[in-house]
Image: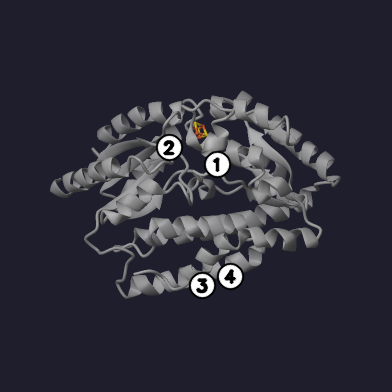
Amino acid sequence: MKAEKMACFDAATRNAAASIKIVRDRGKKFVGTYCIFAPQELIIAAGAVPVTLCSTKEEPIADGEKYLPRNFCPLIKSSYGFAITGKCAFFNNAEFIIGETTCDGKKKMFEMMGIFKPLVVLELPQSAGSEAQRQYWRAEIARCKAEIENRLHVTISDEKMTAAIRELNGERARMRELARLNTAIPAPLAATDMLKVIWARNFTFDRAAFNRELAELIAELKEMIAQGKGAAPETAKRIIVTGVPTGVGSEKVIKILEESGAAVVYIENCAGMKQFLDDVSPEGPPLEAIADKYLQTPCSCMSPNSGRLELLVNLAKEYHAHGIVDITWTGCHTYNVESRILGDYLAGHGNIPFIQIETDYSQSDVGQIRTRIEAFLEMIGKK
Ligand code: SF4
Ligand code: SF4
């Protein structure tokens, strides 16, 4: 069963491009981001509109491959393909882009993108554990603030940052409340629908309107739980998806899982819930609080990245998961190596069933993936 309220989230993504003119007519400017390390509070505090740029579609990959190695991660080829061809209206309308030195592929791609688009590239430390790394990243976030101020000709005050922190903390709390509804058996929200809600959040620029729709969806899902209704039957195998970002357009594996009868109860990756995990502390200087929150992002670009391992064990318990599916994009070395680390960790912490699926955005391996997933779900059933 599907919540009726989902209809408006389906429409939000379809109507996204039309809202560009409305935003611009109000005198607002767009700032583009790709990765969840980009501090959205600073963009909002500057009076601009953050937009997470698309990197989840297969269509621009052929154009991306004219400039980038074919064996690159599809996410990077997709974003570059959109950018170089001018096919993404949000990219075209962004005053500038905030990028980060995360994986090698992305930072080299940003070098090429910087030739034709204004970019601010934040240099991430390789790990988040030490005081030196914390101070280094705080300085990078301070540089980011200065870049935004210079480029948009504004001043970002502490008061504006505090207001933006409050606004985004509120949104994150509501997204966590939404996700937590799926701890119920049966889970009321399909993962493919969860992705649509997250996409609608990216592309609905009237934040108050989005939050109203979200509250109504949460109320409807609570009603479904009270009536014992779910997006999949009570007996469905409950799966947590982790790994690389898988958004609208690149949700192939999630769709196969759902078509195979599984209930995907949680999407841990950064196109899913990772971005909503932690709030910015309302205490202390706001710029430092913003920096500290983003540095805690449990991404495989960080070495070590033990926070992700512990998180997944806890999520498996909280969401009554039968297994974990780790998706790796072909060419993504950090998530590929970390998959082995994760599999070993899960085996040693409750022997949680685990499978890695390495794939790209094409449909050529759908049959093969379906066979592996069906075997995995059957194996879980026998445990
Ligand atoms: S997986 Fe890591 S590097 Fe890639 S978009 Fe997410 S946070 Fe950024
Ligand atoms: S999926 Fe991996 S290779 Fe692709 S952009 Fe993210 S970290 Fe880089």
Q: CA distance from mark 3 to mark 4?
A: 6 Å
The residue singled out by tag 4 in the image is: 212
In space, the residues marked 1 and 2 are separated at their CA atoms by: 31 Å
Give the x, y percent position of residue 204.
62, 61
Query: Mark 3 and 2 residues: CB-CB less than 8 Å, in contact?
Result: no
The residue identified by callout 3 is 216
| Residue type, mark 4 in image | Arg
Relative to 141, say whether 1 is above or below: below
> Identity of the amino acid at label 2?
Arg
For disc 2, the marked residue is 308
Q: What is the crowding at mark 2: few (fewer than 14 residues within 10 Å), some, or many (at least 20)?
A: many
Q: Tell me the quarter of the image containing the N terminus.
A: bottom left
* Foreground tag (1 vs 4): 1
| Nearer to us: label 1 or label 2 | 1
Tell whether label 4 touches label 3 (CB within 8 Å).
Answer: yes
Decide which of 243, 60 is in the foreground and name it: 60
Mark 4 or mark 2, earlier in chain: 4
Q: CA distance from mark 4 to mark 2?
A: 31 Å
Residue 177 location (% of width, % of height): 47, 60
Q: Could you tell me which residue is drawn at 48 percent across and 32 percent down?
A: 73
Q: Which mark is residue 323?
A: none
Residue kind at label 3, given as amino acid type: Glu
Asked whether, in this view, residue 377 is left or right of residue 191, the answer is left
Mark 3 nearby-residue class (10 Å; few <14, some 14–19, many ≥20): few
Q: Whole-Å distance between the Cαs marked 1 and 4? A: 34 Å
Pointer 1 or 3: first along the chain: 1
Q: Secondary structure at mark 1?
A: loop
- Which residue is located at x 53 percent, y 61 percent? 174
